[in-house]
């Protein structure tokens, strides 16, 4: 078989990869306007996308940008559905190569990891380092200033390129194909020709370090993209290795740019700050956030990934509690204006199901912490107001239909 024939075979196997990326992308995204429009003729659109990629004619569509206020004020750049398919395609090619390179305690955008895993690991760090709260131990948290807006695109591209060339035997597509897609996605400037959907005044109060409109040339990635989440892990992986291998911290974890350290020696943690600051500046063109350096004895507790970790218990963080109360009260007010006894109305049924899903999603998160009183109070309030619609279970972990 000739080299040319091998390349053609690989390119045609791309059609299966594109369809798989489409199935991955449409999960939980099937109600957006761009996904609905794409699905009207999805097979035709996927074949068209395949040929664009195969012939190296693919170009990302302009982004839409807007401001959201909850849970915090944030600038969002949303890509078209066809571009999200490409993001999943890249992720499916790269993740099997890079995930084994990450340290165990890198929690973001990884199978069987996430925020709950990160909280449990931080709790374990504290227990283990303090020998079940018998010895002194100190917790340090660090944060990177404007992380996504400060990522150097060329440096990121070269990092990825170096690793996939080194591990070509693990690559399930042609090297030229993945490099082409990476160039198109990494070096795409989301601010060019973007459609601004929020009023200009909505950006007031948003720090410049959190906006791509104020990023330096050649820097910044849109936060919401699946690829950006993977790229964020890749970009800081070398720092993780530095912390583990050079600084030799046993108890260290990271979720995106939120870093946590636990050690018996407070002075060792203090001296690590300058070493990490220097490494970030010299190797990654990043800066530690000067106002987000936390160093306290474990007995003081620590906020980490939406939870408040104290000796012997993990409490729900203020933000998750506030969002839970606000969202549920908003939806309860809307439900109070609907006759819920009309169960043969499809629209009413959808509203009821959606409300129950919302409540249970929060209950699922809250029950990972010591939150019985919070869950009990809210579930009882819902049941009291809608006795003919909902009931609770004995542990207030799930809201059930009557």
Image (cartoon, grey):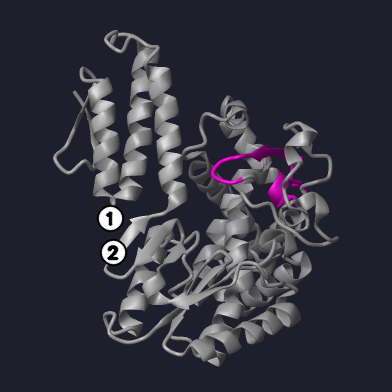
Are the residues tagged 1 and 2 within 8 Å (C-beta)? yes
Check disc 1 and report its element: helix, strand or loop.
loop
In this rendering, would 295 be left or right of 378?
right
Q: Residue at x 47, y 76 (%)?
A: 296
Image quadrant in which the N terminus is located:
bottom right
Residue at the spot of label 1: 370
In this rendering, would 101 be left or right of 85?
left
Q: Residue at x 37, y 65 (%)?
A: 309
Q: Going by the picture, which residue comes out furthest to the front?
A: 300
Task: Give yes or no for residue 53 being in the magenta stretch.
Answer: yes
Measure how far apart labels 1 and 2 are at the Cα level: 7 Å
Q: Residue at x 59, y 72 (%)?
A: 293
Q: Earlier in the sequence, mark 1 or mark 2?
A: 2
Task: Give yes or no for residue 177 being in the magenta stretch.
Answer: no
Residue at the spot of label 2: 313
Which mark is on residue 5? none
Residue 276: image location, x then y, percent? 63, 82
- Between residue 303 and residue 182, name the one nearer to us: 303
Check disc 2 and report its element: helix, strand or loop.
strand
């Amino acid at each position: 078989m000739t080299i040319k024939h091998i390349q053609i075979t690989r390119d045609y196997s791309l059609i299966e990869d594109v369809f798989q990326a489409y199935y991955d992308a449409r999960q939980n995204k099937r109600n957006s306007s761009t996904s609905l429009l794409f699905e009207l003729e999805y097979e035709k659109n996927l074949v068209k996308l395949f040929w664009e990629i195969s012939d190296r004619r693919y170009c990302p569509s302009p982004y839409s940008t807007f401001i959201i206020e909850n849970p915090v004020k944030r600038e969002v750049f949303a890509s078209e559905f066809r571009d999200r398919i490409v993001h999943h395609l890249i992720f499916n090619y790269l993740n099997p190569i890079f995930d084994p390179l990450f340290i165990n305690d890198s929690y973001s955008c990884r199978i069987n990891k996430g925020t709950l895993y990160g909280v449990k690991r931080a709790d374990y760090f504290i227990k283990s380092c303090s020998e079940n709260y018998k010895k002194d131990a100190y917790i340090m948290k660090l944060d990177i200033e404007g992380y996504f807006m400060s990522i150097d695109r060329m440096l990121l591209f070269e990092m990825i390129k170096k690793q996939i060339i080194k591990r070509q035997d693990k690559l399930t597509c042609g090297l030229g194909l993945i490099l082409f897609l990476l160039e198109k996605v990494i070096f795409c400037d989301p601010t060019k020709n973007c459609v601004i959907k929020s009023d200009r005044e909505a950006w007031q109060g948003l720090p410049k370090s959190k906006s791509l409109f104020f990023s330096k040339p050649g820097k910044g990635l849109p936060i919401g993209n699946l690829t950006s989440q993977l790229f964020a892990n890749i970009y800081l992986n070398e720092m993780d290795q530095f912390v583990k291998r050079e600084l030799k911290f046993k108890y260290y974890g990271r979720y995106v740019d939120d870093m946590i350290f636990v050690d018996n020696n407070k002075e060792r943690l203090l001296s690590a700050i300058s070493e990490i600051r220097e490494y970030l500046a010299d190797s990654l063109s990043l800066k530690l956030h000067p106002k987000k350096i936390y160093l306290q004895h474990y007995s003081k507790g620590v906020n980490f990934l939406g939870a408040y970790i104290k000796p012997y218990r993990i409490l729900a963080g203020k933000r998750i509690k506030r969002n839970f109360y606000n969202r549920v009260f908003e939806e309860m007010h809307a439900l109070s204006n609907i006759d819920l006894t009309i169960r043969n109305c499809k629209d009413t049924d959808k509203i009821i199901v959606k409300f129950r899903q919302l409540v249970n999603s929060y209950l699922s998160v809250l029950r990972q912490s010591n939150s019985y009183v919070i869950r009990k109070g809210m579930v009882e309030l819902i049941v009291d107001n809608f006795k003919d619609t909902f009931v609770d279970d004995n542990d207030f972990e799930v809201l059930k239909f009557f």
